[in-house]
Image: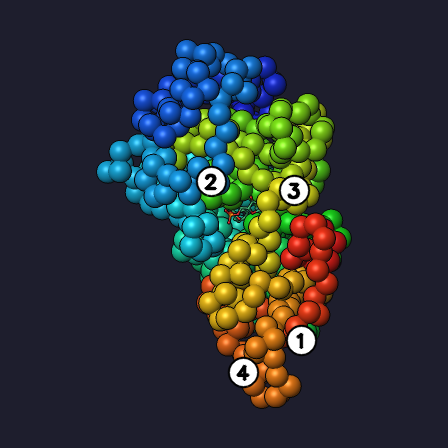
Amino acid sequence: MERYYQEEIECASRERIREIQDEKLVKQVRRVWENVPYYRKKMEEKGITPEDIRSCDDLSKLPFLSKADLRDSYPYGLLGAPLEDCVRIQSTSGTTGKRVVAFYTQHDIDLWEDCCARAIMAAGGTREDVVQVSYGYGLFTGGPGLNGGSHKVGCLTIPTSSGNTDRQIMFIMDLSATILCCTPSYAAYLGERMKEMGLTPEDIPLKAGIFGAEAWSEEMRQDIQKTLGIKAYDIYGLTELSGPGVAFECSAQQGMHINEDHFIAEIIDPDTGEVLPDGEQGELVFTAIDKEAFPMLRYRTRDICTLNREQCSCGRTLVRMAKPKGRSDDMLIIRGVNVFPSQIETVLLKQGYATTYQIVVDRVNNTDTFDVQVEMTPEMFTDNVGEISERQKKLADGLKSMLGIKAKVSLLAPRSIQRSEGKAVRVIDRRKI
Ligand code: DLL
């Protein structure tokens, strides 16, 4: 049995998993108390000390951590290890104020890559496979995470990173890549392009894909599987907890197994913070029990989903999370990139617009469309087509440099966007996912 399929953990009894978690949780809480004054203060405010946490039954006594805490403590306030022991950072695609900077010791990187290695093995990967990693490399965790996991399994790894579609296809075909790792929307796009080039599923050497970082539907999975002639596996994770590999799908394709020897999952009511029983839908909260540099305790992901603790037909006992249904905050994920309405507002305000705008997102041929409709102020209103198109271009450029992705900008006459009597409706998300 290869080391990264760890039957003794992945198929352990629920009692054994619980034992591992109890032991690690107690140690981790003490470490955080001793090393992270920011979290210690939060515990003190709740009147608890490490002695109060004796097992997972006491988990709900611990305070939550949220994105706001990450902002307040940016950049070093949540460090759980001495800076000289840290060897890497990764960061989210958000900009000003929203950017998350996560730290890693070598131990943390190993743990993260082990999780990705498990995901690759669950997708049928072995050292004989050729893995093309078409997630972005750099600050984004997708490329580095899957790259490390692929090395650990012993696969030949092709680090193409994202973009340059024809070159991606050339590598897949010339080097006979068998496993593709990228966002599901990029996989769909690659499929389309290959079809255009006259390649049939039989011509394509790929056998599996490991796709995540954004929500995708079962229909999209079927579509990708058909066009590329592969089995498509979902993978979940977030920068705050390491990156991809917090949870991974197995051949049963019935939810993603959470690596519970490293992460304890809870579902809470996003409004009250109350822990909900298995099967009920709510916000996913994670406690990382092994991480050193960035030890998140009860971190609120804002992802809405359900947990299922029944044994899977693949034999694994690790709890499964359903595909996230959406998020409890206003962040949009468009073509795999995190977009906050507030970022769009920043650009609008800089260029003299009011904040009467609407974001319309849809998914056409498995690719996200992203339209930003903005009202001109009465002062800037004109029917001079040249002037309008110049303004549109300037705004599109501003959005591209803030968000990193292209938006289609339409300028509208004043008062053409319907006003709401309650909260403004800024986002129209027509994607059926
Ligand atoms: O997206 C890590 C990752 C990279 C996961 C590659 C999988 C593959 P962030 O950029 O920090 O990290 O974004 C995290 O993305 O809270 C979810 O809302 C969303 N997300 C990630 N995976 C999935 C998935 C990476 N499989 C945020 N399905 C998370 C739905 C996902 N949403």
Residue 215 against residue 406 in the figure, above or below = above
Q: Are marks 4 and 3 in contact (CB under 8 Å)?
A: no
The CA distance from mark 2 to mark 3 is: 21 Å
Amino acid on which the number 1 mark rests in the picture? Ala
Taking the image as shown, residue 300 lies to the left or right of residue 269, namely left
Q: What residue is pinned by disc 4? A: 390
Residue 131 against residue 18 in the figure, above or below = below
Q: What residue is pinned by disc 1? A: 413
Dot placed on the residue nearer the N-terminal end, 2 or 3? 2
Q: Tell me if I can see residue 285 in this picture.
A: yes
Amino acid on which the number 3 mark rests in the picture? Pro
Q: Are marks 3 and 1 in contact (CB under 8 Å)?
A: no
Between 260 and 167, the one lying in front of the other is: 260
The CA distance from mark 4 to mark 3 is: 40 Å
* SS under mark 4: helix
Picture coordinates of residue 313, whole percent (x, y): 71, 31
Picture coordinates of residue 408, whole percent (x, y): 61, 71
Q: What residue is pinned by disc 3? A: 324
Amino acid on which the number 4 mark rests in the picture? Glu
Image point 46% across, 19% down: which residue? 46
The CA distance from mark 4 to mark 1 is: 16 Å
Q: Residues within 10 Å of mark 1 (few under 14, many from 20)?
A: some
Dot placed on the residue nearer the N-terminal end, 3 or 1? 3
Q: What residue is pinned by disc 2? A: 68
Taking the image as shown, residue 90 lies to the left or right of residue 345, namely left
Q: Tell me if I can see residue 170 in this picture.
A: no
